[in-house]
Amino acid sequence: MDYDLIVVGGGPGGYVAAERAGEHGKKVLLIEKGHLGGVCLNCGCVPSKTLLNSAKVYHYAAHGAAYGVTVEGVKFDLAKAMSRKREVLDTLRKGIAGLMKMNKVEVVQGTAKLVSNREVQVGDRRFTGENILIATGSSPARPPIPGIDNACVYDSTRLLDLEKMPERLIIVGGGVIGCEFACFFGTLGVPVSVIEMLPEICPAVDVEVAKMLRQELGKRNITFHLGARVLSIGDGEVTFATGDKQETLRAGHVLVATGRTCNVADLGLEAAGVDFDRRGIRIDDRCATNVPGVWAIGDATGRQWLAHSASRMGEVVVHNLCGRPDRMRYDAIPGVVYTTPEVATVGLTEAAAKERGIPVKTAKRPMSASGRFLAEHADGRGVCKVVVHAGTNALLGVHMIGGACSEMIYGAVVMIESEMRINEIEDLVFPHPTVSELIRETALMIH
């Protein structure tokens, strides 16, 4: 065999797995058809958050008077924001390339196809490996909407490279991607209309938190149309139905953000005998497929559409290859919506717990109960909500909106992963004044 491990896909799952395997002395080949970093770094998480931060800085400058700071003539320069985004991406790409070199991971650029469960073809070259890890990620979904091929229609990748601000924007889909783009453009003064088929935005988020997010985003030039089904897209217009009512909105740019689809086609999975369908590659809790020596992680499995989940899955695979039994657990995987305000969540929602028949107690506390939050946020609202097992008092879920909750949700991750009870959380000491104190204080409301 040429390699101990061949990794197909250099995103946050693939390159982390390659790095970890290299650290353990494995001979590793990483195959990537584009830039290292995958969708997350190049046309997803990182560029969108870079632009969202630029919009946040603009918002603070434009509303600085509330903090005693007056800035005259505030304006947003899209070209400079895009230039900074490209600098960030270039720096991180170089960083990943450096990690691969440091861990003696061989990198080949090209499109990979499995020839068997031990062989991978890239162009006219063929490589053999004791193990093959598929980490090919996902692509923007293209729902069967009449007119979706119209020139005015953008996906999330294309919209990240705009050279001119749109006069108006219509977003089809009120999930995480749709809401983040709505927040970016709405904050900068662009009127945004979001059309969502479900009765509430961000369906994976606690319904109370999602409702509050929608209300807060409504203050930023964003209008939501819920329970709406898109009928067609024309030249700069979208027609949709809400119940028996039909309506047409007009805008020069239409973003279709209706989710993502697994990249499993044309990989040669059939030749290797791997069990898969359009929903993803089937794996067990070790991320192993039905074929010995073939593994799969990240979006390609359809299990969870999160970069950090893919990274952890990559580590699980490497641990098992190196003789350390490990398995993937999904009960304490955090999720974040990087809007302003931010949403961060981990564990079960109240509704999900009830669907599973788990008896729960809940408590919630407004962010305004935190002195730190009030000191740093002149406007806006927030809340921290906890879900606890009614019988054992074990923490099952934490759901927050407001402030930099993405930076403190990891504390709740540790608590849930450790199966901490309320009395154990009571023993913890949080720094004061911080917004993170609310996690403990809200939990103690139940105790």
Image: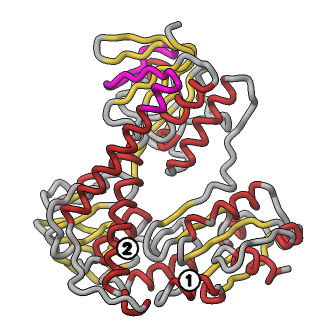
| Residue visible at 60% across and 26% down in the picture | 23
Which portion, as a residue range, is magenta? 98-118
Q: Report crowding for label 1: few under 14, some 14 to 19, many 20 or more residues within 10 A (C-alpha).
A: many
Nearest the viewer among 340 and 371 is 371
**Label 1 amino acid?**
Gly
Above or below: residue 392 compared with residue 329:
below
Residue located at (74% from left, 28% from top): 324
What distance separates the C-alpha of mark 2 from that of mark 1? Answer: 17 Å
Question: Which residue carries the number 1 mark?
Answer: 382
Q: Nearer the viewer, residue 61 or 410?
A: 61
Earlier in the chain: of badge 2 and badge 1, it is 2
Q: Which residue is mark 2?
A: 56
Percent across and percent down for residue 397 are: 70, 67
Residue 201, position as x, y percentages in the image: 45, 73
Whether residue 246 appears in this view of the structure is: yes
Residue 428 is situated, as x and y percent measured from the top left of the image, at 82, 68
The color scheme shown is: secondary structure
Question: Residue 149 vs residue 356: left or right?
Answer: left
Q: Which amino acid type corresponds to the residue marked 2 in the rendered image?
A: Lys
Residue 376, compared with residue 41, is above or below; it is below
155 above or below 434? above
Residue 113 lies within the magenta run:
yes
Q: Does the magenta run of residues contain 357? A: no
> Which residue lies at the image location 51% right of the left edge and 51% below the top edge?
306
